[in-house]
Image (cartoon, grey):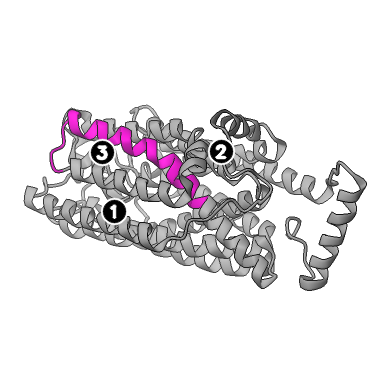
Amino acid sequence: MSLLNLASSLYATGGLGLASLATIYGFFAISCPVAPVVIRFLGTKWVIVAACCTYCVYIAMNFYPTYYTLIPAAVLLGMSIGPFWSAQGTHLTTSAMNLADITSETHEAVISRFNGVFFLFCLACQIPGNLVSSLVLFSGTNGTSNDTDLSFCGANNCGAVPAANSSGSDTPDQTTVYILFGTLLAWCTLSIPMAAFFMNPLPSYCPVLPAKRGALEQLKTTFTLALSPRMFLLIPLNIYNGLELGFAFGDFTKVYRFTDQAYISCTQGVQTIGFVMAAYGVGGGISALFLGIISKYTGRLPIFTAGFLSQVVLMTMMLFWDPYQGQLWHLYLMAVAWAFGGVLRESQLAAFVGVLFPKDQEPAFSNLRFWQAIAYSLAFGFSIPDFMCVSYMLRALLGILCLGMGLYYLLEWRIRHEKPVYKTVAQKERRTEEIQEKQDETGETELTSM
């Protein structure tokens, strides 16, 4: 993630950095529909191992960055990310459901806790990566001067700021860059034997399904699931997740184009980006772990609502934030608040999808990542044109968030009021007995716990 954040800054000449990022996220979206087929034939473990190898290939190609090396590596990486993230969600959800059956906890409580722990470490990678970018790669910058025109900062930013306003960056020494690449490649290489030797291969949680579905049948299930009411009502919220991540790592920081700055680099200098985004990682990691634990007691509805309200307050504040009166701690607060709302939906939405589709985890997580990948690509593309104002993006995000949460509340209402359909009377009686036994043991239901 730290390398992707720096790609277009390091390779600005000829647009190689932007081209590699666009290639990665474009093929990420393309790979999502076929992810269930790959997972069914390879299993979650070996999909993860193979994806780790493609990450290493992409990092290695950065030692000799050209269109002939970096773009093919970006295609390979993009095609592996869809199966990788779908396999991660399936593997984690299956592990959580197996543990829930042993401990007699509800599936939703354990899945939420597992997702909280996972996203704690996932977001923690922002800390070392961004600290490296600030302390090493941009050590030569001096921040903004007192006479800098800040009228183009914040929500007022509508493209490239005047040249006198640019905080710029010294070109990092090539040896320093190679040390960074070598460190990243070493960690990536270590992940391969870790996954290969210590991860247990997990079969599908639903024992009644065949071990191997045909490729065409699996693809049909993936596209059919996208049109089901439960998944369809979550699509706008999935899209918002991708858009807000694109905004957080694009317009909030503008780390990849130093002449087009919005909040952090425009007011405090480019060397501050890493420290502020490290705070993003700390806040997001702690929030993910905390929310994963308390969801057992609160249910998902209060957590989703808290995230919704925090994002509305945050974006409203960012719309009216005055760069001349702004302080550095304001930016740290924005980063932590953004991380809280983002990880809240990201972790809890993944847990919710696992609970909604226990028998179709692979196509469910494939759909989840597909819409997020599309939205992330759109956010990345919309931040490139000079005419796209930050205020327009914030208002669009607010509108999509309100739409997504409205449909989420509708889905919750449907779940609470829908009645199960059984093909036979015996099946209904057996399911009734199972539910009664579960309630006697835990005093809770699995899906409608809110």
Residue under label 3, please give it: 257
Q: Helix, strand or loop at disc 2?
A: helix
State left or right for residue 202 relative to residue 387.
Answer: right
Residue span colored magenta: 63-89
- Residue position for label 2: 367
Q: Is residue 353 above or below residue 156?
A: below
Give the image location of residue 320, x and y in percent: 47, 47
Q: Is residue 69 magenta?
A: yes
Residue 415 image position (x, y, % from top left): 77, 48
Disc 2 marks a residue whose amino acid type is Asn
Q: Is residue 433 above or below residue 227?
A: below
At 34% across and 59% down in the image, what residue appears? 125
How many numbered marks have been drawn onto this rendered protein structure?
3
Q: Can you tell which quarter of the image residue 196 is in?
A: bottom left
| Horizontal relation, residue 419 to residue 208: left or right | right
Does the image show residue 317?
no
- Distance Cα–Cα, label 3 vs label 1: 12 Å
Q: Secondary structure at mark 3?
A: loop
The chief SS type of the magenta part is helix
> 202 or 170, which is in the foreground?
202
Instruction: Report if residue 324 lies within the magenta region.
Output: no
Q: Name the amino acid type tagged 3.
A: Arg
Front residue (pair 76, 252): 76
Quadrant in which the C terminus is drawn: bottom right
In this view of the protein, which residue sits in the foreground, 14 or 193?
193
Name the residue located 80 percent from the left edge and 51 percent from the top edge. 416
